[in-house]
Image (cartoon, grey):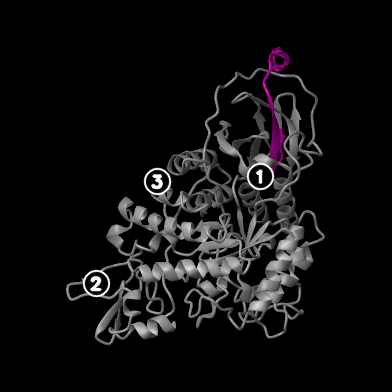
């Protein structure tokens, strides 16, 4: 959404608590480097990583300076080589704005981006490459130029009740959840527009509105979309500042999304729904995880960036376990998280980290070793920067060293000087580049099943420079360890939850080793260790 929204925080994936803690004694083993194959973890599978694309800024296929759907199709080989298994397209519908979050026609393609045939061709090509396509579905509000709202201005129109209008006793000074105005003046009438006057809120107490939005969702599923990112998912009924932390309102929102899910299931029971539920407490977001597949994990994003920036663990493992526990209780089953570092509404993470490449690599490693479906914002993988206002967070993707190279979009000119080495061309053949690190980490997820869908467990390190957590699924278990600091760090390994960790599966540094029962991690490096069941023989070998 545009910058009028204040970012808050959501969500979580779920938990299975691990039993037991075996005492660690000095063990003998030869120093060991990373194993070439993730033994016993599982066959390669989709990474589960989604890639957020602002089509206008991504790739220009026809030379008019504006990115388009054919441009996304042209770059599918790049996305496949990166290892992503899904793309999220920011709004592609007709809209009077550059960002598209105020929609005038929900069943058409923005002509600046191409045609319906272009969309269908993109979906077909993406599916052939094993890449899913989800669309940004903005249904809390429409554009004030939408034909529905134009008709609704007439109180006698059947569309009048599709929107929310002030009555004679309405407090016109009410505030939105982020403190902005709620009511917008239109002649002698006042309508609700909690984001801006150009975005009038729809009235979900009207069955006709609910029916229309379910029908639109079904339309795009039939066109081949694999699901939707649901914009402003918590604000269908959460409109006023005094209601922002109301569990009753959250349950009312969730009830609508249950109805929406049920309606879509008739076309595609496997449609993927991820909600933008901004909040700071998992318990407030929990009602949404039953009707939706996931909600974006805003609280964890704050911890990830803070940990990477400070070089000290901000309780990532504890938060992961807590999130999974709360969400499992709410949904009655394991919930896949949707972690991320930044998105189109926020300052880019490389700017948050003040351009520090090592800190950025650590942030990427933290994100991409979390279970669930991590989201990467386009350009994040090459270190693009951006800050407010919003257009500067949504600048043209840097494909080439030259800004005038074919395919580079030119609709927005960056006010921030860009380094020549921040581009796909400059980084693609350098395994030590940020792009190389993203590619490496995403491919880890293909090989190591618990990184994708593991149940989290805590693993205390006693060292604030180390962040660690356990992940376990039906295929096995792993221990993830990150050195957040610029100095080498050691971790004495111990058996936890019936698993012994003594084999390096992957590491971002060739110098990472296990020496006896001690993991030695160079500065800013990460490792994944295989967990093997503890047996009497294992315990005997670990006893001096």
The crowd level at tag 1 (other Cα within 10 Å; few <14, some 14-19, many 20+) is some
Q: Position of residue 195 (x, y in %)?
A: 39, 71
270 in relation to 208, above or below = above
Mark 1, residue position: 486
Mark 2 vs mark 1, foreground winner is 2
Q: Can residue 218 be seen?
A: yes
Q: Earlier in the sequence, mark 2 or mark 3?
A: 2
Q: Which quadrant holds residue 457?
A: top right
Mark 2 → mark 3, Cα distance in angstroms = 30 Å
Task: Give the mark, 2 or 1, whose residue is nearer the N terminus.
Answer: 2
Can you identify the residue that label 3 sits on?
283
- Location of residue 527 by image quarter: top right
Q: Report the residue marked by disc 2.
A: 173
Asked if residue 531 lies in the magenta stretch, the reply is yes
Q: Earlier in the sequence, mark 1 or mark 3?
A: 3
Tag 1's secondary structure? loop
Q: How many marks?
A: 3
Q: Are marks 1 and 3 in contact (CB under 8 Å)?
A: no
Q: Residues within 10 Å of mark 3 (few under 14, many from 20)?
A: some
Please state the horizontal and vertical placement of residue 81, each as a whole percent of the image: 77, 59
Residue 289 counted in the magenta span: no
What's the magenta region? 520-544
| 36 vs 334, nearest the viewer | 334
Quadrant holding the C terminus: top right
């Amino acid at each position: 959404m545009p910058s009028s929204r204040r970012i808050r925080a959501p969500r979580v994936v779920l938990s299975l608590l691990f039993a037991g803690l075996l005492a660690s004694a000095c063990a003998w083993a030869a120093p060991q480097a990373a194993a070439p194959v993730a033994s016993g973890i599982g066959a390669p599978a989709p990474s589960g990583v989604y890639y957020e694309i602002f089509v206008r800024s991504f790739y220009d296929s026809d030379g008019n300076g504006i990115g388009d759907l054919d441009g996304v199709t042209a770059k599918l080989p790049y996305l496949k080589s990166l290892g992503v298994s899904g793309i999220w397209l920011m709004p592609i519908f007709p809209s009077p704005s550059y960002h598209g979050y105020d929609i005038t026609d929900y069943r058409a393609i923005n002509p600046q981006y191409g045609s319906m045939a272009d969309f269908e061709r993109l979906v077909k090509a993406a599916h052939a490459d094993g890449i899913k396509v989800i669309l940004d579905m903005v249904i809390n509000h429409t554009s004030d130029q939408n034909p529905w709202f134009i008709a609704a201005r007439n109180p006698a129109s059947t569309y009048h009740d599709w929107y929310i209008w002030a009555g004679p006793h309405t407090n016109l000074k009410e505030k939105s959840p982020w403190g902005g105005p709620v009511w917008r003046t239109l002649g002698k009438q006042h309508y609700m527009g909690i984001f801006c006057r150009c975005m009038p809120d729809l009235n979900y107490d009207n069955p006709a509105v609910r029916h229309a939005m379910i029908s639109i969702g079904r339309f795009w599923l039939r066109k081949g979309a694999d699901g939707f990112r649901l914009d402003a998912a918590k604000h269908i009924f959460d409109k006023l500042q005094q209601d922002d932390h109301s569990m009753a309102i959250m349950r009312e929102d969730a009830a609508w999304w249950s109805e929406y899910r049920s309606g879509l299931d008739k076309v595609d029971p496997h449609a993927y729904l991820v909600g933008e539920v901004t909040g700071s407490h998992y318990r407030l977001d929990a009602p949404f995880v039953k009707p939706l597949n996931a909600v974006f994990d805003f609280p964890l994003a704050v911890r990830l960036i803070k940990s990477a920036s400070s070089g000290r663990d901000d309780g990532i493992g504890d938060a992961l376990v807590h999130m999974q526990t709360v969400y499992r209780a709410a949904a009655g089953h394991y919930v896949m998280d949707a972690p991320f570092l930044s998105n189109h509404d926020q300052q880019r993470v490389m700017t948050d980290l003040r351009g520090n490449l090592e800190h950025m690599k650590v942030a990427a490693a933290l994100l991409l070793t979390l279970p669930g479906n991590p989201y990467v914002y386009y350009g994040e993988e090459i270190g693009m920067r951006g800050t407010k206002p919003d257009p500067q967070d949504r600048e043209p993707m840097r494909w080439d060293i030259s800004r005038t190279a074919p395919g580079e979009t030119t609709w927005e000119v960056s006010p921030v000087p860009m380094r020549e080495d921040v581009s796909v061309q400059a980084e693609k053949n350098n395994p030590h580049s940020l792009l190389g690190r993203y590619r490496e980490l995403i491919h880890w997820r293909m090989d190591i099943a618990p990184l994708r869908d593991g149940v989290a467990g805590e693993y205390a390190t006693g060292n604030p420079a180390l962040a660690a957590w356990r992940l376990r699924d039906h295929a096995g278990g792993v221990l993830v360890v990150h050195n957040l600091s610029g100095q080498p760090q050691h971790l004495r390994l111990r058996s936890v939850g019936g698993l012994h960790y003594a084999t390096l599966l992957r590491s971002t540094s060739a110098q990472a080793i296990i020496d006896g029962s001690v993991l030695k991690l160079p500065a800013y490096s990460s490792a994944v260790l295989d967990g093997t069941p503890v047996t009497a023989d294992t315990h005997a070998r670990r006893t001096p």
